[in-house]
Image: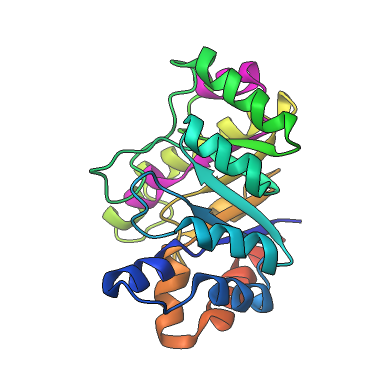
Amino acid sequence: MIELGVNVDHVATVRQARCTYEPDPVWAAVEAHLGGADGITVHLREDRRHIQDEDVRRLRELTHIKLNLEMAATDEMVSVAQGIRPEMAMLVPEGRHEITTEGGLDVAGQEGRLREVVARLAASGIVVSVFIDAELAQVEGARRIGAAVCEVHTGPYAHAFHARGRDAEAPAVVAELDKIRRAGERIRALGMRFNAGHALNYFNVEPVARLPGLRELHIGHAIVSRAVFVGMREAVREMKQLMRQAAR
């Protein structure tokens, strides 16, 4: 059954805007759990622009659903992950000047380094995921480096959906969705888990949630935005309901 991982990074973004102690992303994670979230995702960035090391430590200690740590493939972050031991670590590209993650990790172009990182994390009992574009070459590379999970970047689909007036049948939207579907088929054929995420919201999530074999969706900004008006529990509940209805 399809699962929902809720990214609470932007709860921390609001907190850091005032350099204070609230809102607390750990509290948000508990509320997300009560709303039906199956996991919590956080991205500990090199510049610590939102989530802080202490947040990750407290999330590890205080949440009772799985923790997914998004991270760059650096020695610093591998050390953090080995100390925290989240259920899953997702390797992502990272740039100091980007507002959010702008594309998938080029696994095929840096297999040697990534194979080493995956091995170190796996040796610590951490399931390793890679965030990749919907390209078969990247899927093949993920398999070669030993990744257990591929999270397919849904940003191009989401942007096409918005640009075409939220028309799920627009040719450009259908084409992007088909890329995700084909990547998912190859991921599963190679024995890896098929996850997806990025820029998904309450309007565009259902076509993605219907894709065969999809295990998890990771969604953050849209849920945190909705939570401003309806609360975190209700925002998560609404998203989970859309996903489950679509998957059925």
- Tell which residue pokes out farthest to the top in this image: 112
Q: Front-most of 241 and 63?
A: 63
Residue 213 location, x and y as percent?
Answer: 71, 43
Q: Quadrant of the N terminus?
A: bottom right
- At horizontal 39% and vertical 52% (from top left) the residue drawn is 158
Residue 223 location, x and y as percent?
Answer: 47, 70
Q: Front-most of 91 and 235?
A: 91
- The magenta region covers 137-159
> Would residue 94 be found to the left or right of residue 126 on screen?
left
| Up-down relation of residue 49 to residue 17 (above or below) | above
Residue 206 visible in image: no
Q: Front-most of 224 and 119?
A: 119
Of helix, strand and loop, which mostly describes the magenta segment? helix
Residue 121 location, x and y as percent?
Answer: 66, 32
Residue 165 location, x and y as percent?
Answer: 30, 60
- Asked if the magenta segment contains residue 154, the reply would be yes
Q: Quadrant of residue 16?
A: bottom left
What color scheme is it? rainbow
Number of marks in the image?
0
- At horizontal 23% and vertical 43% (from top left) the residue drawn is 97
> Would residue 46 be found to the left or right of residue 6 on screen?
left
| Up-down relation of residue 179 to residue 144 (above or below) | below
- At horizontal 45% and vertical 45% (from top left) the residue drawn is 154
Residue 141 visible in image: yes
Q: Quadrant of the C terminus?
A: bottom right
- At horizontal 28% and vertical 75% (from top left) the residue drawn is 18
- Asked if the magenta segment contains residue 246, the reply would be no
- Tell which residue pokes out farthest to the left in this image: 97
